[in-house]
């Protein structure tokens, strides 16, 4: 991969697969490496038991503004084009509308919120902060709500981190790919769409998954902005080595028109199933014009000491 750093180059690869290797399908390789995958999932999940200080600081900024019921301060944390969704509700779009949304929320039994960061994906100018929340009534300490949250922060031109995508799900239920409910099926379908296009070396289909104004962050490299630049990146990546990539979803925050798909990725050699790379990924999909499109896409490789 010539267009990004060496760290990103270790993540993915491509190249024309010889015909004798085409006969070995990804599912066959996945079965052969089942034990390795179990190790990978455990390793990647336990690698994020404690978030670094800069990640925690973003959660603290949001919590401080919310718990002071300062609508202006809370609204100022968001980008002008920010989007917020709570499970089962349409997305709230834009900083002004989001500020009004939280102002109404403050009036409901004097709430205060505790955020506990459990997972993150950190890049040069995008950071996913993901974890659990609990809302308590200040008047009687009654638990008003609890579940999972996901904040996607972006670094703006002035050097300020602002909240770009904000998702809440009032549920602690773990994600289960075997679940039969519609939300779980849809989440798995989104992950499978990306992996299938990548593993088939289908640049056109892979590029078409992204929204026009999508953003892609690969392991700390500067973010690629827009479908065209993202397509060019993957085109170069698809001609480097011969891997197969699998997305193992561990968390999801499904919404009516915005969904987080989050988990572990691993890359194996198509020929022998050897491990090439592993780490965490986070994708935010938006439902517009009758279909789901990928609008925010983050990848962070697992390395020793991180």
Image: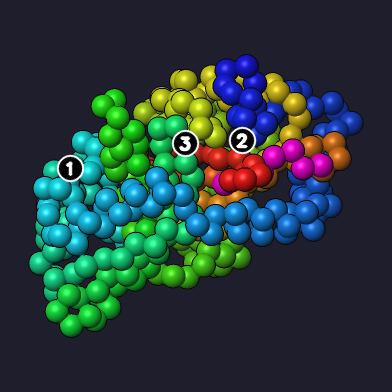
Using the numbered discs, state the Cα–Cα distance from disc 3 to disc 2 in whole angstroms. Answer: 24 Å
The residue singled out by tag 3 in the image is 123
Q: Are there few (<14), some (14-19), or many (20+) residues within 10 Å of tag 2?
A: some
Does residue 73 sit above or below 233 in this rendering? below
- Dominant SS type (magenta): strand
> Quick one: SS at disc 3?
loop
Residue 97, image x, y percentages: 15, 47
State the image quarter where residue 195 is shown: top right
Residue 236 makes an appearance in the image: yes
Q: Earlier in the sequence, mark 1 or mark 3?
A: 1
Tell me where the magenta segment starts and ends, as one range: 274-280
| First in sequence: mark 2 vs mark 1 | 1
Q: Is residue 182 inside the magenta stretch?
A: no
The residue shown at (38%, 52%) is 56
Q: Are marks 3 and 2 in contact (CB under 8 Å)?
A: no
| Residue 279 sits inside the magenta stretch | yes
Q: Are marks 2 and 1 in contact (CB under 8 Å)?
A: no
* Residue 264 spot, x, y in % from top left: 60, 50
Question: Alpha carbon of mark 1 to alpha carbon of mark 3: how far?
Answer: 22 Å
Question: On the image, numbered disc 2 is attached to which residue?
Answer: 197
Residue at 27% of width from left, 50% of height from top? 61
Identity of the residue drawn at 17% across and 42% down: 76
10 Å crowding of disc 3: few (<14), some (14-19), many (20+): many
185 w.r.t. 2: above or below: below
């Amino acid at each position: 991969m010539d267009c990004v750093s060496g760290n990103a180059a270790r993540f993915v690869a491509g190249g024309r697969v010889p015909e004798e290797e085409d006969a070995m399908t990804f599912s066959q390789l996945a079965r052969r490496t089942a034990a390795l995958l179990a190790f990978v999932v455990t390793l990647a999940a336990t690698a994020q038991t404690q978030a670094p200080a800069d990640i925690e600081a973003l959660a603290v900024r949001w919590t401080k503004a919310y718990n002071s019921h300062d609508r202006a301060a809370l609204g100022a944390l968001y980008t002008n084009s920010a989007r917020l969704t709570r499970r089962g509700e349409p997305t709230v779009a834009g900083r002004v509308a989001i500020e009004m949304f939280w102002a109404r929320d403050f009036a409901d039994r004097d709430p205060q919120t505790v955020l506990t960061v459990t997972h993150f994906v950190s890049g040069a100018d995008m950071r996913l902060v993901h974890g659990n929340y609990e809302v308590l009534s200040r008047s009687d300490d009654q638990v008003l709500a609890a579940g999972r949250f996901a904040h996607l922060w972006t670094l703006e031109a002035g050097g300020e981190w602002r909240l770009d995508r904000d998702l809440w799900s009032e549920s602690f239920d773990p994600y289960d790919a075997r679940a039969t409910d519609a939300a779980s099926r849809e989440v798995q379908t989104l992950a499978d769409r990306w992996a299938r296009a990548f593993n088939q070396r289908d640049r056109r289909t892979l590029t078409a998954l992204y929204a026009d104004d999508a953003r892609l962050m690969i392991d700390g490299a500067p973010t690629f902005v827009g479908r065209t630049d993202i397509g060019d990146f993957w085109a170069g990546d698809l001609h480097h080595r011969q891997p197969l990539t699998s997305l193992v979803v561990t968390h999801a925050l499904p919404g009516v028109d915005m969904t987080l798909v989050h988990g572990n990725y691993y890359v194996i050699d198509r020929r022998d199933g050897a491990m090439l790379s592993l780490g965490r990924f986070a994708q935010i999909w938006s439902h517009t014009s009758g279909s789901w499109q990928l609008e925010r896409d983050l990848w962070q490789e697992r390395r020793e000491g991180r």
